[in-house]
Structures are given as structure tokens and as C-alpha cells.
Image (spheres, rainbow, N blue to C red):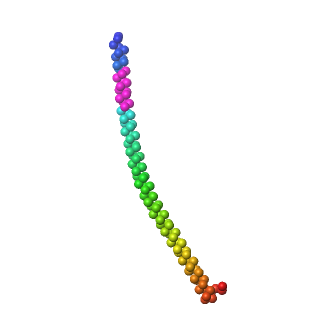
């Protein structure tokens, strides 16, 4: 009869060890899955960083192009005003317009 509680205790300890080993195995698998998920997210973030850098570069080019166009438009507007003034002067001198 004295062997029975000891056998029972040993059996419980074995079961606890088995459960603990299974739990460790599950946690290791879970950790590996989490690490893989982080690797995937990091890969996507790297792709995103490359895309953002490309967009920044393109944006800089577009800003420069817009600034150049704006200067060109200002020059053209100035030239058009000059031409309009000359046409008005010619019209006045030729008598096409009374003024």
C-alpha cells in the first residue's frame, strides 16, 4: 500500500513533465510562427521604404518641373504684355484705334 501513493505521485510527475514538454513544443512553434510573421512584415516594410523613397524622388522632380513651368509662364506672360503694348502703339500710330 505504501507503493501506491508513490506510484501515483510518480505518474503525476511524468504526466506533468509530458504536459510541460508539449507546452514548450507548442510555445516554440508559436515563437517560430511569430518570428516568421515579423520577417514577412519587415520584408514588406523594406518594400514600402523603397517605394516611399521613389515617390520622394519623383515628387522632387515634379516640384522642380512645376517651378520651371511657373517661371516659363511668367516669362511668356511678360512677353505677351509687351506684344500687346506694341500692338496698341501700332494701332494708335496707324489710326486703327482712336486714342
Which residue is pictured at 43% across the width and 52% down the height?
A: 48
Q: Residue extending furthest bottom?
A: 94
Which residue, as the protein is rendered here, is positioned at the far top? 1
Which residue is the extreme one toward the right? 99
Residue 75 in the image: above or below residue 28: below
Magenta region: 12-24
Please say if 70 is above or below 30. Answer: below
Identify the image quadrant of residue 20.
Answer: top left
Quadrant of the snapshot with the N terminus = top left
What secondary structure characterizes most of the magenta part?
Answer: helix
Q: Is residue 7 left or right of residue 83?
A: left
Residue 73 spot, x, y in % from top left:
52, 72
| Residue at image location 55% in from the left, 75% down from the top | 78
Q: Position of residue 57 (x, y in %)?
A: 44, 60
What residue is rendered at 34% in x and 16% in y? 7
Q: In this rendering, would 90 be left or right of 62?
A: right
Q: Quadrant of residue 6?
A: top left
Q: Residue at x 39, y 37 (%)?
A: 30
Amino acid at each position: 500500500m505504501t507503493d501506491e501513493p508513490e506510484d501515483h505521485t510518480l505518474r503525476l510527475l511524468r504526466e506533468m513533465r509530458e504536459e510541460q514538454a508539449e507546452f514548450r513544443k507548442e510555445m516554440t512553434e508559436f515563437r517560430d510562427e511569430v518570428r516568421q510573421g515579423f520577417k514577412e512584415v519587415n520584408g514588406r516594410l523594406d518594400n514600402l521604404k523603397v517605394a516611399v523613397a521613389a515617390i520622394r524622388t519623383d515628387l522632387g522632380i515634379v516640384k522642380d518641373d512645376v517651378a520651371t513651368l511657373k517661371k516659363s509662364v511668367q516669362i511668356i506672360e511678360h512677353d505677351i504684355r509687351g506684344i500687346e503694348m506694341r500692338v496698341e502703339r501700332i494701332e494708335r500710330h496707324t489710326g486703327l484705334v482712336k486714342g
